C-alpha cells in the first residue's frame, strides 16, 4: 500500500488514469439496467441515505480506480432522486482530503437538521507503521450543495476498552437530542454496538454500550442501524465472524433484533433473539431512512467483503439493492419493493390456470423483468426455475417445499460459478398457508425475491448465459391455482 499513488480529489486524477479505468469496462456483458452500480471501479456500502431539500440523497463507498494498478482513491459518490427510481449522479460528496480521513471516508449516515444535511461518518487513517486511528467526523451540506467539515473531530480514536475497529455511525434525532449507534470491537475481540450522544450535534460523548442479549455477535459488528416501528425498537447490524457457527451460510450476514424502544438513558433494549434479515447469497451493509411520508426505507449493498464477482474482469464491481419499504408485523420485519418502482413496468404477460401434479408452466420472462406469481395451497413442493434456459438445465432454482417446510434457493446451475466455497444453496424454514405469493425482480446480474409480501426476502448476484431468459414453474403436488404477471422493465441511465 505504501507504494500506491494516492489522490485526495477525483478531479486531480490524471485523465489518462481515468481513461484507463473506463477502458476496462468497455464491452462488459454484466451491466445492470435499473440498479445502481458504478461506472468504473468498486462500489460497496450505501451511505448517507436521507431526504433533504426536496430530494432523496444516497451515497455509496466508491473506489473508481480499484482495478488500475498502482493508484488509489476512495470516497463517497453522491446521487439524488425525487422518486427513488431515477437517480441523478452528482459526483463525489466526501473525499480523503483531511488528516482525519486520509485513507478514505468510511461509512456513515445523514439526517436533515436545521436547513442542512447533517453527515456523520468515520474517517480512516493509517500511520507509517500501518496503525489505524479512526475518527468520527461531522460534515454539513447546505441547500446549495456546499460541504462544510466540523473540527475537531466528534471523537478521536476509540473509547477505552475497544480496539481501533470503531466505525459506521448511524444518526437519529430524538426529543431534540442527537444520537448515533456505532459498530465496535471490544478488547476481547467481540462485536459490540455503542451509542454516542450530543445535545447540539457539535460536541459528542460516548453514552455506552447496548446489551444485545446475544451469546455471540462475532468478532466485529459493522453498520448498525437503530429505528422504531410499531412502538418497538429495531437494530439491524452486520456481525462478522459467525460463519463457523452456521451451516454453509454467507461469510458475513445481516441480522436484525426487535426489542423495546431503546432507553437512551440506561441503553436498555431487551431484544428478542436475532434473525436473519435476508436469505440470499449477496447482501451486506444495510442502511435505512425515514421518508417524508413516514415510510421506513431500506437499501443495501448486493455484495459481501472478500467475495469476488465476474464483473471484476471488466473493471467494475458492486451494485445496490432496490429501495424497500420496511414494516414490522408480529415481531418480524417485512421488506417490500417501494411502490415507485412500478413506473419501470413496460409490457406485461399474464397467465392463469389450474396446475396439476407434474405439470409445468413456461414463459419467456426475459432478463430484465418483474414477475408476481400467486399460488394456491402447496401440498408437496413447487419449483421455480428463474433466469432459466429453455430446457431448464441452467437456472437459479427456487423450491417451495411444503412437506419439508422450507424454502431452498439454489444457484448451483445459475451460470458462471461465483464464491462456491461458501456453498450454492440457502435453506430457510418456512410455513406455507393457503396462498403463496412470490415477487421477483430480475436484472442482468441480480435476483431479488420477496415471498408473502416480504416476510421472506433474498438478494443474490447471478451471472447467467444470454439464453437464460425463461421462467419454468413445476408443481409436484395436488392441483393448484396459479396466476403469473410478468412485466418487462425499462432500464435507466446510471452511468457515473
Image (cartoon, rainbow, N blue to C red):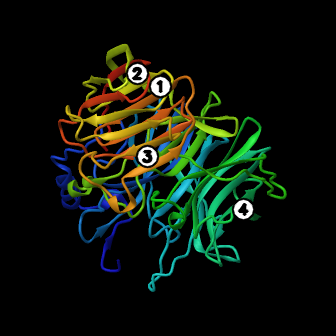
Distance from Cα at disc 4 to Cα at disc 3: 26 Å
Helix or strand or loop: what does disc 4 sit on? loop
State the residue in front, 219 or 408: 408
Quadrant placement of the N terminus: bottom left
The residue labelled by disc 3 is 78
- How many residues crowd mark 3 within 10 Å: few (<14), some (14–19), many (20+)? many
Using the image, tell me which numbered label, if any, was put on residue 204: 4
Point 55% across, 75% down: residue: 133
Q: How far apart are the two marked residues, 1 and 3, measured between alpha carbons?
A: 21 Å
> Which numbered disc flags the more N-terminal residue, 1 or 4?
4
Q: For the residues labelled 3 and 2, say whether their Cβ atoms are less than 8 Å apart.
A: no
Tell which tag, 1 or 3, sits nearer the viewer. Answer: 1
**Mark 2 highlights which residue?**
343
Identify which residue, 390 or 10, lies in the foreground: 390
Tell me the crowding category of disc 1: few under 14, some 14 to 19, or many 20 or more residues within 10 angstroms, Cα based: few
Is residue 411 visible in the rendered image? The answer is yes
User: Residue at 71% across / 77% down in the picture?
Assistant: 160
Residue 483 on image: x %, y %: 41, 17
Q: Which mark is residue 340?
A: 1
Q: Dot 4: few (<14), some (14–19), or many (≥20) neighbours within 10 Å?
A: some
- Asked whether disc 4 touches disc 3, contact meaning CB atoms under 8 Å apart, the reply is no
* Secondary structure under the numbered disc 2 in the rendered image: helix
Residue, x 68% and y 65% (percent of image)? 215
Asked if the residue under mark 3 is in contact with the one under mark 1, i.e. CB atoms within 8 Å, the reply is no
**Screen quadrant of the C terminus:** top left
Residue 472 x %, y %: 30, 29
State which mark lies toward you, 3 or 2. Answer: 2
**Residue 62 occupies quadrant:** bottom left
Could you tell whether 295 is left or right of 58 in the image?
Answer: right
| Separation (CA) of disc 1 from disc 4 | 37 Å
Labels 2 and 4: the sequence-earlier one: 4
Amino acid at each position: 500500500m505504501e507504494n500506491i499513488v494516492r489522490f485526495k480529489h477525483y478531479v486531480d486524477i490524471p485523465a489518462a488514469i481515468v481513461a484507463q479505468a473506463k477502458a476496462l469496462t468497455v464491452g462488459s456483458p454484466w451491466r445492470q439496467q435499473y440498479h445502481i452500480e458504478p461506472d468504473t471501479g468498486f462500489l460497496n456500502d450505501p451511505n448517507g441515505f436521507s431526504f433533504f431539500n426536496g430530494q432523496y440523497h444516497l451515497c455509496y463507498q466508491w473506489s473508481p480506480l480499484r482495478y488500475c494498478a498502482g493508484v488509489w482513491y476512495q470516497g463517497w459518490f453522491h446521487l439524488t432522486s425525487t422518486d427513488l427510481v431515477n437517480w441523478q449522479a452528482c459526483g463525489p460528496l466526501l473525499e480523503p482530503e483531511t488528516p482525519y480521513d486520509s485513507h478514505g471516508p468510511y461509512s456513515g449516515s445523514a439526517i436533515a437538521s436545521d436547513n442542512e444535511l447533517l453527515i456523520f461518518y468515520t474517517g480512516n487513517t493509517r500511520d507509517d507503521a500501518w496503525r489505524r486511528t479512526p475518527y468520527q467526523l461531522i460534515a454539513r451540506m447546505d441547500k446549495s450543495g456546499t460541504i462544510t467539515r466540523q473540527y475537531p473531530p466528534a471523537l478521536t480514536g476509540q473509547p477505552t476498552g475497544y480496539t481501533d475497529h470503531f466505525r459506521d455511525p448511524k444518526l437519529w434525532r430524538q426529543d431534540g437530542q442527537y444520537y448515533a449507534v456505532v459498530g465496535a470491537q471490544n478488547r476481547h475481540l467481540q462485536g459490540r454496538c455503542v451509542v454516542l450522544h450530543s445535545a447540539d450535534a457539535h460536541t459528542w460523548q460516548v453514552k455506552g454500550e447496548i446489551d444485545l442479549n446475544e451469546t455471540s455477535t462475532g468478532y466485529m459488528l459493522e453498520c448498525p442501524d437503530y429505528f422504531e416501528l410499531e412502538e418497538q425498537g429495531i437494530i439491524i447490524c452486520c456481525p462478522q465472524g459467525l460463519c463457523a457457527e452456521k451451516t454453509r451460510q454467507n461469510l458475513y450476514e445481516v441480522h436484525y433484533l426487535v426489542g423495546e424502544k431503546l432507553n437512551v438513558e440506561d441503553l436498555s433494549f431487551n431484544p428478542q433473539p436475532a434473525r436473519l434479515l435476508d436469505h440470499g447469497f449477496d447482501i451486506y451493509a444495510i442502511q435505512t431512512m425515514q421518508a417524508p411520508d413516514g415510510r421506513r426505507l431500506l437499501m443495501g449493498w448486493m455484495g459481501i467483503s472478500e467475495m469476488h464477482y465476474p464483473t471484476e474482469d471488466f473493471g467494475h464491481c458492486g451494485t445496490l439493492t432496490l429501495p424497500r419499504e420496511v414494516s414490522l408485523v408480529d415481531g418480524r420485519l417485512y421488506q417490500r419493493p417501494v411502490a415507485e418502482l412500478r413506473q419501470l413496468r413496460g409490457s406485461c404477460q399474464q397467465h392463469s390456470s389450474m396446475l396439476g401434479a407434474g405439470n409445468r408452466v413456461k414463459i419467456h420472462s426475459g432478463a430484465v423483468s418483474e414477475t408476481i406469481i400467486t399460488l394456491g395451497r402447496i401440498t408437496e413442493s413447487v419449483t421455480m426455475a428463474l433466469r432459466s434456459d429453455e430446457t431448464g438445465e441452467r437456472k437459479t432454482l427456487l423450491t417451495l417445499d411444503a412437506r419439508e417446510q422450507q424454502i431452498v434457493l439454489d444457484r448451483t446451475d445459475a451460470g458462471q460459478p461465483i464464491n462456491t466455497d461458501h456453498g450454492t444453496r440457502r435453506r430457510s424454514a418456512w410455513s406455507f398457508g393457503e396462498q403463496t405469493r412470490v415477487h421477483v425482480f430480475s436484472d442482468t446480474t441480480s435476483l431479488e425475491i420477496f415471498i408473502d409480501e416480504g416476510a421472506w426476502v433474498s438478494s443474490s448476484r447471478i451471472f447467467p448465459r444470454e439464453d437464460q431468459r425463461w421462467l419454468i414453474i413445476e408443481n409436484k403436488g395436488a392441483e393448484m391455482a396459479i396466476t403469473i404477471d410478468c412485466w418487462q422493465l425499462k432500464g435507466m441511465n446510471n452511468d457515473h
